[in-house]
Amino acid sequence: MIPDKNLKYSKDHEWIEVDGETAIVGITNYAQVQLGDIVYVELPDIGMRADKDEAICAVESVKTAADIIAPLSGEVLEVNAALDDNPELINEDPYVAWIMKIQMDDITEIESLLSEDEYANFCENEG
Amino acid sequence: MSKLIFEMSRPGRRAFELPETEIPQKSSAELFNSKSLRKSDARLPEVSELDVVRHFTELSNRNFGVDTGFYPLGSCTMKYNPKINEKVASFEGFTELHPHQPADSVQGALELMHDLETYLAEITGMDFISLQPSAGAQGEMAGLMVIKAYHDKRRDTARTKILCPDSAHGTNPASAAVAGFDIINVKSNDRGMVDVDELRKLSGEDTAGLMLTNPNTLGLFEKDILEIAEIIHDCGGLLYYDGANANAILGQTRPGDMGFDVVHLNLHKTFTTPHGGGGPGAGPIGVKERLHAFLPVPWIEKTGDKYEFNYDKPDSIGKVKSLYGNFLVLIRAYAYIRTMGKEGLKQVSENAVLNANYVLARLKDAYDVPFGDRCMHEFVISGEKQKEMGANTLGIAKRLLDYGYHPPTIYFPLIVKEAMMIEPTETESKETLDDFVDALLKINAEIEEDPEMVNTAPHTTVVRRLDEVHAARHPVLKYDFPE
Amino acid sequence: MHRYIPNTESEKKLMMEQIGIQSIDELFSSIPEEIRHGDGSILPPGMSEQELIVHMRELAMKNISAYDLKCFLGAGTYDHFIPTAVGALTSRSEFYTAYTPYQAEISQGVLQAIFEYQTMVCELTGMEAANASMYDGVSATAEACAIALVTARKRNKIIVSASILPETREVIKTYMNGRDVVLLEIPFKDGETDYDALEKTLDDNTVAVCIQSPNFFGIIEDMDRVGEMIKDAGAAMIVNTDLLSLGILKPPSEAGADFVVGDAQPLGNPMAFGGPHLGFFATSGKYIRKMPGRIVGETVDTEGEKGYVLTLQTREQHIRREKATSNICSNHALNALASTIYMSLVGKEGIKEVALRCANNARYTREMLIKTGKFSDLFGKPFFKEFAVKADTDIKILNEDLHKLGYIGGFNLEKKFPWLEGGWLVAVTEKRTKVEIDDFTRLAGDAV
């Protein structure tokens, strides 16, 4: 699957779309393939604090559960409620099925994220 | 497909009767304030006794136990559960004991438990035993709490880390987390054993202890155990033994002699107490002298001929279980040890290890054997070759069901891809082992021909492959009563 | 050759040839010489079945049990009647020699039985979901505390009422040791949770409150009142209860319980000197996916046939490892099966009848004890099947006297609460007859 936006990435296999002061966060194709059929997304609460590099919520598949690590610090503005009933949307199109929107504290944190090429390299070395 | 017991209900049917009584009987409305009472009845079944008996008999026919067939589950030690153990554990002199009866009315029970402690201490080479934990996991938690209490008592509060091999059973890190530790994973080397140099680097002043199974979960004996013990002890840590694989070493060597400070045993594995469809088990722990003060209370004190419960242990970690342990499970383990005796237990490990090596020897050409062709009581093979041919370990396991076998443990340990862990145990005959090997070889041949048969297995069981994704996405965890 | 080990000498030879060794000893060569076990084991030699039965019989006969004496002792473990079909069915070896039902296709028997068990626990407790069993009521309560703690962010106080079973309090302490939590105990007043003290202690740092009803003294607590307070504080309500009492009493779900836990030993499992008993664990809403232990769910197979599987396993230790909220692996499945069969046998009407019989028998016993003029109510509150009286005597001696006369007397409350001298906690189940109760109470009165 090829994402059609100019996205940033984290080493925890999240994609981040920057929209002004808001960061939209989801998980990458690599992550959803590793997880297998996703059965549940434990969405964060709206208004919750996201602390960079700390676990904020979780995604469960039949065979494993993975913490989602907040790639940036800020406040959770919105969550994708569609994932409550249809967690499989993430398997179907991981770059459309966003998980949460964060109001960033510090926009310079974006610089610590990976570009598309850097992320592709990172995945190759992991595998 | 079997009806649920609720679907068999018919209003007015009964399977139970209380005796008549001369004691005046009031109704619930007369006895209790209306706001304390239920407004509507709990919808328990209304069936006859024969309904109940037929229903659960039918369910038993849709289940597979050791008595049904071969059960080579690695790490579970599915050996024969002797019937005599069931009989003696059902004596009313045991089952009808109330736990708070005074000690002099339960001397037989206390004697049994005390002697069991003595035997388990002997078998493990430890100094003191507590029979309290209900299962291996609870034993681990208790054992780790003992380790924590030991360090806390010495005010050595820097020791926050427990080291665990990456091949360890999931309960090891989970128990350590529950006991309040951080977990450090120790990588295995390419021979499947603890990487001693890694270990040396990782151990230090923050090491509370190392948890090890020996033989490890690959069925290999950690040859460097004495060096490993030295490394941990030198840095001030303690060594914890996960007794899940004790079947390999009964009468051959003892964790106490290897240098372990704390041990737990799984009585429902090595000591043949039945698995019960998931439990109950028992996970007694053993410790060396210096940790004795921290064991759970009460302990059984013998003075002359009399036995008593003693609660005087100020540094104890407390209770992990409300009472003394899973007594009816302990009885079965005791009866087994008395049946086998010193010589019998040695034969257990000899034959368990012989059987495993025999099965490995016959399988090693058709299946990948990642860690050499010698093992202890269990071994791990990989379905990687078969994966390249279009099948996988899951399919092989499900296809074994069609051949009448319970599959081995699959996808564990995590460090082997497409893992299949096989533990035959000593109670199986050579014919059974040969037939099982033949089935696995046939399945391999099927995969070479056309893997689809294997990928869509099982075909002959009462239900076909069940959709676990559906179950997890839309959980239905109880019967939906019609309105 | 031992009767449990089939390998004959000739078979062993054949196997050794296949492996390529001369002796079995070679297979143990990876064990360092220094730790190869000597022959100094003190274990006794093995026994034949004949000898073992005689020996076990001797041990059993050194005990005097509720089989020989009439039991009026409770305090968390109860002498209830177990219908014969329970044991007959649980001793089917397809059940008791089976492993955990991870291979669902050949374990539909156990899985369906547990699904039925989960349903029955939900019916009685009024909660949305129940798990496949825990070790016992005390660990179930402790685990509920752990789940509540992990779920409540930024709070770390857990309140426990002193009117719950003392062993539960002790085990909660053990389980919470090593976690970042403050455990606070609320005293009891007149045999019940001190509700005013509870209200004062509740705050926005409270994770959960643990209460028990019927409580350790047999008294039915005011769960509605407690539920209101806890809700206002935004904390979790953990109620430990007796499933049998829920045959007639209001389920804790109606008071707003978040977790309903306890020990289901009274339903089909023997007293067994304390174990194995049966922990049940039921919850609703956001906690369902956090329940510890195994859970059975309904699903379909590839042909659309209904079947059962273990589900929501990603919470469990074998997947989450150090991130699991609980380390539980083995549970008490066979005891859950026994309770399921028991609940099927007594059924919708029977469970009410048993509960009522216990309540009536207990009331009659209390009346007769008070009539002797030697006993008075210790608390005088509404109770289920157990009640506390007091007498001007040493309860230890009273129990010793009654023991000689054929009775296991009630719990000596002074053992757990030193200021309750002369306090006697008496439990009366459906097994006790008028003759027994009349005799017991008369003898108790005489002995004081």
Image (cartoon, rainbow, N blue to C red):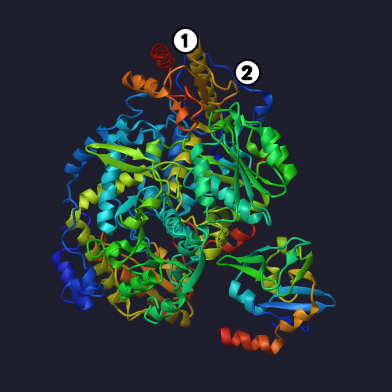
- Residue B214 visible here: yes
Quadrant showing the C terminus of chain C: top left
Q: Is residue B187 left or right of residue A62?
A: left
Q: Position of residue A35 (x, y in %)?
A: 60, 72
Q: Quadrant of residue B263?
A: bottom left
The x and y percentages for residue C283 are 62, 47
Which residue sits at x=32%, y=36%? B94
Helix, strand, or loop for circle 1? loop
Q: Residue at 47% x, 12% y: name it.
A: C374
Query: In the visual, does C194 lie left or right of B376?
Result: right
Residue B472, x across and y down, in percent: 60, 60
Which of B93 and B150 lies nearest the eye of the viewer?
Answer: B150
Spatial CA span between label 1 and label 2: 25 Å
Question: Residue B44 placed where, x, y %?
Answer: 56, 36
| Image quadrant where residue C162 sits | top right
- Residue type for callout 1: Thr
Name the amino acid, label 2: Glu
**Mark 1 chain:** C
The answer to whether dots 1 and 2 both sit on one chain is no
Residue that badge 2 annotates: B30
Query: Which residue has dot 1 on it?
Result: C372
In this view, the residue farthest toward the right is A20
